[in-house]
Every structure is written in C-alpha cells, then in structure tokens.
Amino acid sequence: MFHLDHLCLGVRDLNDGVRRVREETGLAHYDGGAFAASIANTIFPLGGDAYLEVEAVMPTADKRDEGVAWFDRAVADGDRWMFWSLRADTLEEMTEVAQRLGGEVARRPGRTQPDGTQRIITTAPGPGRALDTCWRRGLPNWFYRDDPATNPDRGATEHGERGVAVTRLEIGADAGELREHIGAETFDRLPLAIVPGRPGVRAVTVRTESGREVTLRRDPADL
C-alpha cells in the first residue's frame, strides 16, 4: 500500500520561508538539518506520517555546484513547490514500482540531522530518474522507511500546533496519468484534487490538533 510521505517547498531564504509558512498556518516545526548539496531543511509535521519539508540553499553553499544552481533557479521568483512523494509499506512494492518505471530501488545518504546523525533514504525510481519520470509531470516518486519510528513526521517540534491529517492535496497533473502512475486504489484513497495548469503541487490543507484546517498555497516550480 502507498501513502502520502512528504511535500517539498523550496524557498530562497530558509528562516524567512519558515517564518512565512508558520505565520500563514500556525503549524509547528523543527530543524531538519542539511543535505550534502548544501540545502538546509526545516520539517513541519502534518500528521499520519506525512510532513512538509521547507528547503533553501545555505548561504555558505558553493554556487558552482550543479544541484545548488538548479535549486536557485527553481526558486528565483519566490517560494515554489518542488515535488511530492509517496511512501511504500514494503520493499517489494518499491521494487515493483522501480521495475515498472524502468528504474531501481536506491539507498543513498539523505540529510544530516542537527545532532550529527546521517539519515539514509531508500527511494525509487532511482537516481536521476525522479525529475523527468515524476516531478516535471506533477507525479510523485517513492520512499520506503524500514523503521517507522524515525519518520520525520514524528519528530519533536517547536512553537505552533502540530498537524494531525492532510485533508486535501491539490495537484496539477493529468488525472489519468496520475491514476496509472500511483494505482487506482491509492488515487481513490488519497485526498487528491486534480487541477489544471502547470504540473506539480498547488496547495495542501492540514487539520491541526485543535481541529482547525489550514491551507498552504504556492505555485509549483518550473522544473
């Protein structure tokens, strides 16, 4: 079975981007650390083992790095949704996805947490394939987490109110292509709203601990 795993919002300045998300939604968050490509990360738990990651290039990053330059271009005009991802219950499901998309299941370093812990991620359809096979068409890639207790949604937060459930996820995509990509059962179970226009995430609505529903709306990046 597949579940919503996370959404990525790219911003030009992390502190300022996190402040805007917090002011608009009241959602709690915590420092997620940084990736080797000099991308810093803040986590907003959304509930149900789903989360939002807000990311930005670190001020000390080497601008000659290809990944950093690509990220900078994507957020040149402000906050932009970068991609969304699903989570598989089993490695067997991940393998089936990778084979169907002509890729592979890959394990590689993820972000380094503030305490120095290096996270390892397991993802499909594999290195170099998510951009063209998934994200540019508004489609998700996949992750697998062998220890649910380490899911970023479960991290201890600061300030604000925790999300408890994603109640609506607006996606720009071809509905038929998305249904085929993720499977009819997943398509029907997720709180998806398919909208016209540029492919990618458009908005996410989250129910909080107090029962409020808050919506974060941005344009998708031109990937």
Image (cartoon, rainbow, N blue to C red):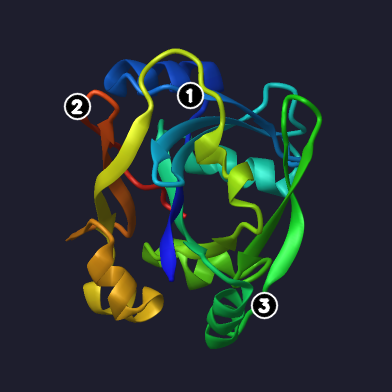
Q: Tell which circle, 3 or 1, labels the residue nearer the N-terminal end.
A: 1
The residue at the point 37 percent across, 62 percent down is 138
Q: Identify residue type, mark 1.
A: His
Q: Is residue 207 left or right of residue 90?
A: left
Q: Position of residue 140 (x, y in %)?
A: 44, 63
User: Quick one: 100 or 152, which is closer to the camera?
Assistant: 152
Give residue 25's quadrant in the image: top left
Q: Identify residue type, mark 3.
A: Glu
User: Quick one: 120 or 222, which is closer to the camera?
Assistant: 120
Q: Tell which circle, 2 or 3, labels the residue nearer the N-terminal end.
A: 3
Residue at label 3? 104
Q: Position of residue 2 (x, y in %)?
A: 43, 67
Q: Is residue 203 visible?
A: no
Residue at label 1? 29
Q: Tell which circle, 1 or 2, labels the residue nearer the N-terminal end.
A: 1
Q: In terms of secondary structure, where does tag 2 sit?
A: loop
Q: Is residue 148 visible?
A: yes
- Residue lying at the far top of the rendered structure: 159
Q: Position of residue 79 (x, y in %)?
A: 41, 33
The residue at the point 31 percent across, 42 percent down is 165
Category of crowding for the residue at label 1, using alpha-carbon neighbours closer than 10 angstroms: few (below 14), some (14–19), many (at least 20) = many
Q: In terms of secondary structure, where does tag 3 sit?
A: loop
State which mark lies toward you, 3 or 1.
1
The quarter of the rendered structure image containing the N terminus is bottom left
Tag 3–tag 1 contact (CB < 8 Å):
no
Residue at label 2? 212
Distance between mark 1 and mark 2 Cα atoms: 17 Å
Give residue 175's quadrant in the image: bottom left
The residue at the point 28 percent across, 29 percent down is 208
